[in-house]
Protein backbone atom coordinates (compact mmCIF):
# COMPACT_ATOMS: atom_id res chain seq x y z
CA UNK A 1 0.00 0.00 0.00
CA UNK A 2 1.31 3.44 -0.90
CA UNK A 3 1.73 6.11 1.78
CA UNK A 4 2.82 9.75 1.46
CA UNK A 5 5.21 9.23 4.39
CA UNK A 6 7.96 6.73 5.25
CA UNK A 7 8.48 7.32 8.96
CA UNK A 8 6.26 8.28 11.92
CA UNK A 9 7.37 9.92 15.17
CA UNK A 10 4.81 9.64 17.98
CA UNK A 11 4.83 10.99 21.50
CA UNK A 12 3.67 8.62 24.26
CA UNK A 13 1.89 10.41 27.14
CA UNK A 14 -1.57 11.69 26.15
CA UNK A 15 -0.80 10.64 22.57
CA UNK A 16 -0.59 6.84 22.81
CA UNK A 17 -1.20 6.47 26.54
CA UNK A 18 -3.97 8.12 28.55
CA UNK A 19 -3.55 8.99 32.24
CA UNK A 20 -7.22 9.56 32.96
CA UNK A 21 -7.27 6.33 34.95
CA UNK A 22 -4.76 4.40 37.08
CA UNK A 23 -2.95 2.47 35.76
CA UNK A 24 -2.51 4.36 32.45
CA UNK A 25 -4.44 3.06 29.44
CA UNK A 26 -2.80 2.38 26.08
CA UNK A 27 -4.66 3.36 22.88
CA UNK A 28 -4.72 -0.16 21.47
CA UNK A 29 -6.52 0.84 18.26
CA UNK A 30 -3.76 3.29 17.36
CA UNK A 31 -1.09 0.77 18.37
CA UNK A 32 -2.63 -1.83 16.04
CA UNK A 33 -2.55 0.69 13.21
CA UNK A 34 1.12 1.49 13.88
CA UNK A 35 1.91 -2.23 13.73
CA UNK A 36 0.07 -2.41 10.41
CA UNK A 37 2.19 0.44 9.06
CA UNK A 38 5.36 -1.35 10.15
CA UNK A 39 4.32 -4.41 8.16
CA UNK A 40 3.86 -2.12 5.15
CA UNK A 41 7.41 -0.82 5.48
CA UNK A 42 6.78 2.37 7.46
CA UNK A 43 9.22 2.98 10.30
CA UNK A 44 7.69 4.03 13.62
CA UNK A 45 9.63 5.84 16.37
CA UNK A 46 8.47 6.87 19.80
CA UNK A 47 9.57 10.40 20.66
CA UNK A 48 9.10 11.07 24.35
CA UNK A 49 10.27 13.04 27.36
CA UNK A 50 10.61 9.73 29.19
CA UNK A 51 13.96 7.90 29.36
CA UNK A 52 14.13 4.20 28.45
CA UNK A 53 13.61 2.83 31.97
CA UNK A 54 10.45 4.92 32.36
CA UNK A 55 8.97 3.68 29.07
CA UNK A 56 9.78 0.14 30.13
CA UNK A 57 8.18 0.50 33.55
CA UNK A 58 4.82 1.58 32.14
CA UNK A 59 4.86 -1.68 30.13
CA UNK A 60 4.75 0.16 26.80
CA UNK A 61 6.97 -2.44 25.11
CA UNK A 62 4.40 -5.07 26.06
CA UNK A 63 2.08 -3.43 23.51
CA UNK A 64 4.46 -2.13 20.90
CA UNK A 65 8.06 -2.51 19.72
CA UNK A 66 9.12 0.64 17.84
CA UNK A 67 11.82 0.73 15.18
CA UNK A 68 13.68 3.25 17.30
CA UNK A 69 13.34 5.65 20.21
CA UNK A 70 14.01 9.33 20.79
CA UNK A 71 14.19 9.61 24.56
CA UNK A 72 14.51 12.32 27.23
CA UNK A 73 13.05 14.91 24.85
CA UNK A 74 15.82 14.25 22.34
CA UNK A 75 18.61 13.73 24.87
CA UNK A 76 19.50 10.42 23.26
CA UNK A 77 18.46 8.15 20.40
CA UNK A 78 18.36 4.35 20.34
CA UNK A 79 18.10 2.41 17.07
CA UNK A 80 18.44 -1.39 16.94
CA UNK A 81 19.36 -1.44 20.65
CA UNK A 82 22.30 0.89 19.99
CA UNK A 83 22.69 4.47 21.19
CA UNK A 84 23.47 6.51 18.07
CA UNK A 85 23.33 9.96 19.69
CA UNK A 86 23.45 11.38 23.20
CA UNK A 87 24.08 14.51 25.23
CA UNK A 88 25.77 14.17 28.61
CA UNK A 89 25.55 16.32 31.71
CA UNK A 90 29.04 17.35 32.92
CA UNK A 91 30.02 15.36 36.01
CA UNK A 92 30.83 18.50 38.02
CA UNK A 93 27.44 20.04 37.25
CA UNK A 94 25.61 16.87 38.25
CA UNK A 95 27.58 16.68 41.51
CA UNK A 96 26.80 20.34 42.26
CA UNK A 97 23.10 19.66 41.68
CA UNK A 98 23.18 16.67 44.03
CA UNK A 99 25.08 18.53 46.75
CA UNK A 100 22.57 21.37 46.64
CA UNK A 101 19.66 18.92 46.76
CA UNK A 102 21.10 17.17 49.82
CA UNK A 103 21.63 20.54 51.52
CA UNK A 104 17.89 21.24 51.15
CA UNK A 105 16.82 17.67 51.98
CA UNK A 106 15.66 16.96 48.43
CA UNK A 107 16.24 14.09 46.03
CA UNK A 108 17.66 13.80 42.51
CA UNK A 109 17.32 11.12 39.86
CA UNK A 110 20.30 10.48 37.60
CA UNK A 111 19.32 9.18 34.15
CA UNK A 112 21.49 6.72 32.23
CA UNK A 113 20.79 4.99 28.92
CA UNK A 114 18.75 2.08 30.28
CA UNK A 115 18.39 2.70 34.02
CA UNK A 116 18.42 5.38 36.72
CA UNK A 117 19.23 5.98 40.38
CA UNK A 118 18.43 8.39 43.20
CA UNK A 119 20.84 9.86 45.72
CA UNK A 120 19.01 9.38 49.06
CA UNK A 121 15.89 7.87 50.63
CA UNK A 122 13.80 11.05 50.79
CA UNK A 123 10.96 9.97 48.49
CA UNK A 124 8.32 12.54 49.48
CA UNK A 125 8.37 14.56 46.21
CA UNK A 126 9.35 11.47 44.23
CA UNK A 127 6.10 9.75 45.20
CA UNK A 128 4.10 12.89 44.38
CA UNK A 129 5.55 12.94 40.86
CA UNK A 130 5.20 9.19 40.39
CA UNK A 131 1.54 9.41 41.36
CA UNK A 132 1.05 11.35 38.10
CA UNK A 133 3.59 9.40 36.05
CA UNK A 134 3.84 5.96 37.72
CA UNK A 135 7.28 4.39 38.08
CA UNK A 136 9.09 2.19 40.54
CA UNK A 137 11.27 3.92 43.12
CA UNK A 138 14.85 3.96 41.74
CA UNK A 139 17.71 2.45 43.77
CA UNK A 140 20.06 4.69 45.75
CA UNK A 141 23.61 5.13 44.45
CA UNK A 142 26.61 7.36 45.09
CA UNK A 143 26.28 10.39 42.84
CA UNK A 144 30.00 11.05 42.46
CA UNK A 145 31.69 10.47 39.08
CA UNK A 146 28.45 9.42 37.39
CA UNK A 147 27.92 9.80 33.65
CA UNK A 148 24.29 10.79 33.13
CA UNK A 149 22.20 11.95 30.19
CA UNK A 150 20.29 14.31 32.45
CA UNK A 151 18.60 14.48 35.82
CA UNK A 152 15.29 15.02 37.57
CA UNK A 153 15.12 17.25 40.62
CA UNK A 154 12.22 16.30 42.89
CA UNK A 155 11.22 19.63 44.40
CA UNK A 156 8.40 22.16 44.51
CA UNK A 157 8.63 25.53 42.77
CA UNK A 158 9.70 27.33 45.96
CA UNK A 159 13.18 25.94 45.29
CA UNK A 160 13.43 27.14 41.68
CA UNK A 161 15.16 30.42 42.48
CA UNK A 162 17.72 28.70 44.70
CA UNK A 163 18.72 26.15 42.08
CA UNK A 164 18.63 28.55 39.15
CA UNK A 165 20.93 30.94 40.99
CA UNK A 166 23.39 28.19 41.94
CA UNK A 167 23.44 26.38 38.61
CA UNK A 168 23.40 29.63 36.59
CA UNK A 169 23.34 29.13 32.82
CA UNK A 170 25.45 25.97 32.90
CA UNK A 171 22.40 23.70 33.15
CA UNK A 172 19.07 23.77 31.32
CA UNK A 173 16.29 23.86 33.94
CA UNK A 174 12.73 22.94 32.93
CA UNK A 175 9.88 22.51 35.41
CA UNK A 176 7.25 20.13 34.02
CA UNK A 177 5.43 19.16 37.20
CA UNK A 178 4.63 20.63 40.64
CA UNK A 179 7.19 18.20 42.08
CA UNK A 180 9.55 17.64 39.15
CA UNK A 181 12.22 19.51 37.15
CA UNK A 182 14.20 18.22 34.17
CA UNK A 183 17.86 19.23 34.07
CA UNK A 184 20.39 18.72 31.27
CA UNK A 185 23.60 20.20 29.92
CA UNK A 186 21.67 21.78 27.06
CA UNK A 187 18.14 22.14 25.83
CA UNK A 188 17.00 18.71 24.66
CA UNK A 189 15.14 19.15 21.40
CA UNK A 190 12.93 16.52 19.79
CA UNK A 191 13.20 18.26 16.43
CA UNK A 192 17.02 18.07 16.43
CA UNK A 193 16.80 14.36 17.25
CA UNK A 194 14.29 13.75 14.46
CA UNK A 195 16.63 15.35 11.93
CA UNK A 196 19.42 13.03 13.11
CA UNK A 197 17.13 10.01 12.61
CA UNK A 198 16.16 11.20 9.13
CA UNK A 199 19.85 11.57 8.25
CA UNK A 200 20.50 8.08 9.63
CA UNK A 201 17.99 6.60 7.18
CA UNK A 202 18.78 9.06 4.38
CA UNK A 203 15.22 10.38 4.51
CA UNK A 204 13.90 13.90 3.99
CA UNK A 205 11.53 16.12 5.93
CA UNK A 206 8.78 15.38 3.42
CA UNK A 207 8.97 11.68 4.31
CA UNK A 208 8.02 12.19 7.94
CA UNK A 209 5.00 12.62 10.23
CA UNK A 210 5.16 13.70 13.88
CA UNK A 211 2.30 13.46 16.38
CA UNK A 212 2.13 15.01 19.84
CA UNK A 213 0.19 17.03 22.38
CA UNK A 214 2.56 19.15 24.50
CA UNK A 215 4.88 22.13 24.03
CA UNK A 216 7.99 19.98 23.60
CA UNK A 217 6.33 18.45 20.55
CA UNK A 218 6.25 21.72 18.61
CA UNK A 219 9.91 21.25 17.68
CA UNK A 220 8.94 17.92 16.10
CA UNK A 221 6.52 19.67 13.76
CA UNK A 222 9.30 21.89 12.42
CA UNK A 223 11.37 18.85 11.47
CA UNK A 224 8.70 17.05 9.41
CA UNK A 225 6.21 17.76 6.64
CA UNK A 226 3.13 16.60 8.55
CA UNK A 227 2.87 17.93 12.11
CA UNK A 228 -0.16 16.48 13.88
CA UNK A 229 -1.60 17.87 17.11
CA UNK A 230 -3.84 15.59 19.13
CA UNK A 231 -7.37 16.81 19.80
CA UNK A 232 -6.41 16.98 23.49
CA UNK A 233 -3.24 19.01 22.73
CA UNK A 234 -2.50 22.43 24.17
CA UNK A 235 -3.72 25.36 22.10
CA UNK A 236 -0.23 26.54 21.14
CA UNK A 237 0.58 23.03 19.91
CA UNK A 238 -2.52 23.03 17.72
CA UNK A 239 -1.53 26.39 16.27
CA UNK A 240 1.87 24.98 15.26
CA UNK A 241 0.45 21.86 13.60
CA UNK A 242 -0.50 21.23 9.99
CA UNK A 243 -3.35 18.96 11.07
CA UNK A 244 -5.43 18.65 14.25
CA UNK A 245 -6.62 15.13 14.96
CA UNK A 246 -9.14 13.66 17.37
CA UNK A 247 -8.26 13.24 21.04
CA UNK A 248 -6.66 10.15 22.52
CA UNK A 249 -9.98 8.64 23.64
CA UNK A 250 -11.06 8.69 19.97
CA UNK A 251 -7.81 7.15 18.68
CA UNK A 252 -6.26 10.38 17.41
CA UNK A 253 -3.03 8.78 16.17
CA UNK A 254 -4.83 6.25 14.00
CA UNK A 255 -7.28 8.87 12.74
CA UNK A 256 -4.51 11.27 11.71
CA UNK A 257 -2.38 8.70 9.92
CA UNK A 258 -5.37 7.36 7.98
CA UNK A 259 -6.44 10.93 7.12
CA UNK A 260 -2.98 11.82 5.75
CA UNK A 261 -3.01 8.70 3.60
Image: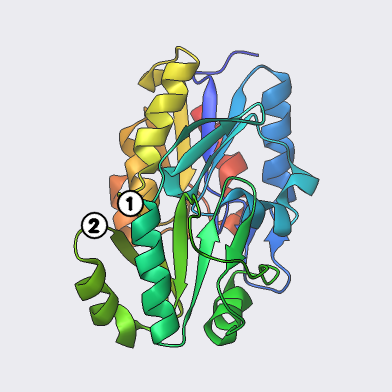
Q: Is residue 14 left or right of residue 167?
A: right
For the residue pair 191 and 6, the one nearer the viewer reads as 191
Query: Which residue appears at 64% of the width and 29% of the height?
Result: 67
Q: Residue furthest right?
A: 62
Residue 190 in picture, x, y percent from top left: 40, 42
Res. 26 image quadrant: bottom right
Q: How many marks?
A: 2
Query: Which residue appears at 61% of the width and 74% of the height?
Result: 130
Quadrant where the C terminus is found in the figure: top right
Query: Which residue appears at 66% of the width and 17% of the height?
Result: 41
Q: CA distance from mark 1 to mark 2?
A: 7 Å
> Few, some or many C-alpha atoms within 10 Å of disc 1 (few <14, some 14-19, many ≥20)?
many
Q: Which mark is residue 185?
A: 1
Please indicate, yes or no, whether residue 178 appears anywhere in the rendered image: no
Please indicate, yes or no, whether residue 113 appears anywhere in the rendered image: yes
Q: Can you say whether 150 is above or below 125 in the image? A: above
Res. 121 image quadrant: bottom right
Q: Are marks 1 and 2 in contact (CB under 8 Å)?
A: yes
Sequence-earlier tag: 1 or 2: 2
Q: Can you say whether 199 is above or below 9 in the image? A: above
Q: Is residue 33 left or right of residue 166?
A: right
Residue 50 in picture, x, y percent from top left: 54, 54
Residue 194 in picture, x, y percent from top left: 42, 32
Q: Secondary structure at mark 2?
A: loop
Q: Which mark is residue 170?
A: 2
Query: Which residue appears at 71% of the width and 62% of the height?
Result: 25
Residue 133 in picture, x, y percent from top left: 60, 69
Amino acid sequence: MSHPYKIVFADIDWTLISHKKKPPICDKASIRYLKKLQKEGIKVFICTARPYHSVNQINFFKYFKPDGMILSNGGYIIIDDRVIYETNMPIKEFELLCELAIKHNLNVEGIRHYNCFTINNNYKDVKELFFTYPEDLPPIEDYHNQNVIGATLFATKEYDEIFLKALKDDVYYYRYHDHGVDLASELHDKGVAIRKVLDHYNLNKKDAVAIGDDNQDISMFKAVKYGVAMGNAKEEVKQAATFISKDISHHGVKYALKHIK
